[in-house]
Amino acid sequence: MTVLKDPTLFREAALVAGEWIETGEEAITVTDPATGAAIGRVPRIGAADVRRAIAVAAAAQREWASRTAKERSDVLRRWFELLQANKEDLGRILTLEQGKPLPEAIGEIGYGASFIEWFSEEARRVNGDIIPGHQPDKRILVFKQPVGVVAAITPWNFPNAMITRKAGPAFAAGCAMVLKPASQTPFSAIALAVLAERAGLPAGLFSVVTGSASEIGAELTANPTVRKLTFTGSTEIGVALYRQSAPTVKKLGLELGGNAPFIVFDDADIAAAVEGALIAKYRNNGQTCVCANRIYVQDGVYDAFAEKLAQAVSRLRTGNGFDEGVTLGPLIDAAALAKVEEHVSDAVSKGARILLGGKPHALGGTFYEPTILADVTKEMAVAREETFGPVAPLFRFADEADVIAQANDTEFGLASYFYAKDLSRVFRVAEALDYGMVGVNTGLISTAEAPFGGVKLSGLGREGSRYGIDEFLELKYVCLGGV
Ligand code: ADP
């Protein structure tokens, strides 16, 4: 167990309806993906406790919504400051359960905290509207009101930031939240709740329920008091939750899978493209939904790009995220490793060449070598499915229209990237890509200021930015007569 400056941030308990439920007999064991060792246990919360959390959240929400925006903003600001002040401990907890290198984990805490900061500011700018009436004695007023109780289900790849990106706008808007974190990474969620309490978030407004995803998910989606479900995870589960939410007609926010193209045109700055690919592909060991999944390189620069990328990737260091100088951690679990192995062997069997890596790492466990595949074609699984691992497949292309068609030939539409200098091309390609987000000459696009989200099977709604809070608000139209 890693040493924390404040050991109370690591709690083997769930926060249900304002009370901590300590881990008892019924528990889930959480392991360190780098070593396989057990790091702690969290309670298995059942449907009855989830129901109670929702009912108490509804009462807490009404009180919270009745406060001034400034009061809500102040609480969020304190939460942000506590996240910053405890950045190292939170990063340690994150590395311990998720595996990413400690500097990257601490970076995620800063990124996660930035959503609480941003929405503490946005809380005060939820302005309604007054519209000239349709008759002389009438005025049309538009109120913006919180949707009410929100359920959140979050993944393991960003155990902190995927929560704050939802909780920030929800609390800013005046909502309550019942959160089900990923079972692989509950301790980061619990630490967030410890600090939320300390910041003065009212009891019962924020519950963190750990346990069986299907049992908790069933209650969160069926319960009519929950008015919105916000989910980040796989498209498969997102679709199931969408279906489960239909009978109670919930508002939905879905951040689902991606299959991001990363295109390098002949006129690109190759050194910059290599640097961008390194970030877009290997960050979090390839386990992000905005990771470059297909790298298309134009004929004229293909060999030079491949060579420079191989040089850069060979400098990455795989290992335990707590070790100095490590840049790539383990994969989250055995299933993730199996998928990566499957994708690589499928590609090789269909003619791909391994430029680098291509096999499990000598460290064993779920470590996998950073890998580059050349001569990849659309017949291979890597072209259609998200690999979610440190594998860069290089496709060759000849012309712009063709690469745009290939890039768009997927059911997903989250992030996309391209490198080019020609200004007309930059506009043409940015407009033609069927994606919610486009990075031009950059491999890193996520930030609290910008709307994050996808189209097609990548999801519904946007998170972050000034638009993000709208997802947690309802418009109420009030017609004022007899003026
Ligand atoms: P990933 O591939 O990132 O693990 P999942 O969609 O399986 O994506 O998991 C994302 C989140 O959804 C996790 O918190 C997981 O526990 C939760 N989850 C998985 N299955 C269900 C389900 N049937 N109902 C509700 N939540 C689920």
Image (tube, rainbow, N blue to C red):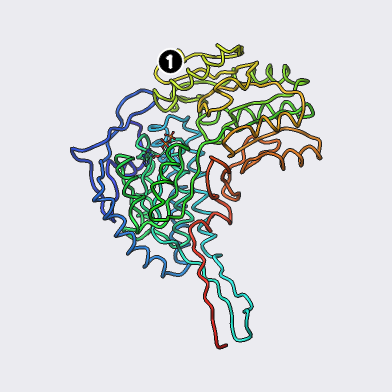
Q: Quadrant of the N terminus?
A: top left
Q: Please indicate whether residue 324 sits to the left or right of residue 454 in the image.
A: left
Which residue occupies 72% across, 32% down? Answer: 419
Residue 182 percent location from the top left of the image: 38, 39
Q: Please indicate whether residue 99 sits to the left or right of residue 277 in the image.
A: left
User: Mark 1 belongs to which amino acid?
Assistant: Leu
Residue 445 percent location from the top left of the image: 62, 41
Residue carrying label 1: 363
Residue 342 percent location from the top left of the image: 48, 18
Tell me the element at label 1: loop
In the displayed structure, would residue 55 be above or below residue 353? below
The crowding category of the residue bearing disc 1, from other C-alpha atoms within 10 Å (few below 14, some 14 to 19, many at least 20), is some
Residue 304 percent location from the top left of the image: 73, 18
In the displayed structure, would residue 314 be above or below residue 438? above
**Depth check, front residue: 303 or 429:** 429
**Depth check, front residue: 111 or 483:** 483
Q: Quadrant of residue 379?
A: top right
